[in-house]
Amino acid sequence: MAFEGLADRLQNTIQKIRGKGKVTEADVKEMMREVRLALLEADVNFKVVKDFVKKVSERAVGQEVLKSLTPGQQIIKIVNEELTELMGGEQSKIAVSNRPPTVIMMVGLQGAGKTTTSGKLANLLRKKYNKQPMLVAADIYRPAAIKQLETLGKQLSMPVFSLGDQVSPVEIARQAIAKAKEEHHDYVLIDTAGRLHVDETLMNELKDIKELTKPDEIFLVVDAMTGQDAVNVAQSFNEQLGLTGVVLTKLDGDTRGGAALSIRSVTQTPIKFIGMGEKMDALEPFHPERMASRILGMGDVLTLIEKAQANIDEEKAKELEQKMRTASFTLDDFLDQLGQVRKLGPLDELLKMMPGANKIKGLNNLQIDEKQIAHVEAIIRSMTKQEKLHPEIMNSSRKRRIAAGSGRTVAEVNRLLKQFEDMKKMMKQMSGMQQKAKKKGGFKFPFKPF
């Protein structure tokens, strides 16, 4: 995950100062030396690091900190606030035109993930904001780009406007906007051409499209894994086109996160969205304060809640909670629960959003094998309806049949059944505690299912 090295370094540094009852200027100086190294190692722009360290140091050696009861915590608060400010302060929302459609130009170099990101953004606009977007294939120099956008459109059941590769991109954009008005689309996302580097021909064409379409947003799609290059690319595009936002892709990969921390500061262009995976729903609005919290190991509960609200069936969740209360939870319910949790995204990423997760030993090295969950699902699906409702009827021949049907071993079937039984016992105990407490007027069921 992005920022992993930076997060580890900063959290270790902060840990040293957190519990201190008294903090001296020398302590602050030592801490800022570590912070400076951590940021430079994460590939953050040198000038950005210098300014950041200066701002934090000035505030950290002020009277409010040195004389406060918990100076360590005050310094952490300052680092958190300045980190948030560095990334833009608050979330920069997507534009909405008074006279639809809202036009978004998607620009960037070849290979940054522009076409895929256009599809992801259209998907997000429809799912999260309830809008009707239309995709426009205006990259006529790479025939595969048109085909790729049309394939994404089919996959998402999203309209794609294309006139092939023999019509000029400016004309394609003009006709696309006319069509969008006619069909009452809220957004038009123009997927423009990219090059391997910034050049005059590319920029002139993009300026022509901008001139004609008067876009409400010009989003630069940039690969976070290119580090400082991402910042340089953002600067060039911004100088020539006047960007309104940046979309950082591949922020879930092995990136050092420097681009996310430098782009806003160097170009004064907000990061609007971040790509956190391959799937078509793996694009998130960028919240500077939440990202700062994640980096400092304070979790990101708001994003976790939003993921749950977007992906979890509330009726099923209530039904499941009732079953947990009465301990009438079956293997079918367990399968259902696994499916709902998987919709939220990779489990190791979800765990890192929990406050205090950074304190759990070994969590950073934890590799949650998604295959294990698939194995559990395969075992349960190989059972008959009766077996799922009444696992106690399982005998050795049934277990052998289930193992063969799921491609797993009898030992794995036994392990799953034992874990399920243990879970049911725990639910029964919880339920008993709750009944007793109800009579005394206290104790609420301590957890709700997702």
Image (cartoon, rainbow, N blue to C red):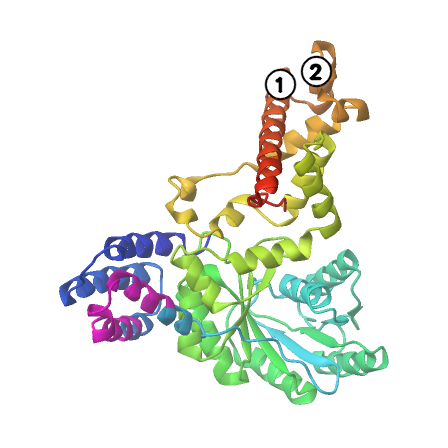
Distance between the Cα atoms at labels 1 and 2?
Answer: 8 Å
Element marked by disc 2: helix
For label 1, the residue is 414
Q: Residues within 10 Å of mark 1 (few under 14, many from 20)?
A: some
Under mark 1, the amino acid is Asn
**Magenta residue span:** 52-80
> Residue at (43%, 61%) from the top-left corner?
293
Instruction: Give the number of the disc on residue 399.
Output: 2
Sequence-first tag of 1 and 2 = 2
> Residue at (33%, 73%) from the top-left corner?
48
Q: Nearer the viewer, residue 277 or 69?
A: 69
The reply to whether residue 352 is in sight is yes
Q: Is residue 72 left or right of residue 356?
A: left
Element marked by disc 1: helix
Secondary structure mostly seen in magenta is helix
- The quarter of the picture where residue 72 lies is bottom left
The reply to whether residue 62 is in sight is no
Under mark 2, the amino acid is Lys
Question: Can you give x and y, in whole percent of width and height, for residue 187 in the image?
Answer: 73, 76
- The quarter of the picture where residue 168 lies is bottom right
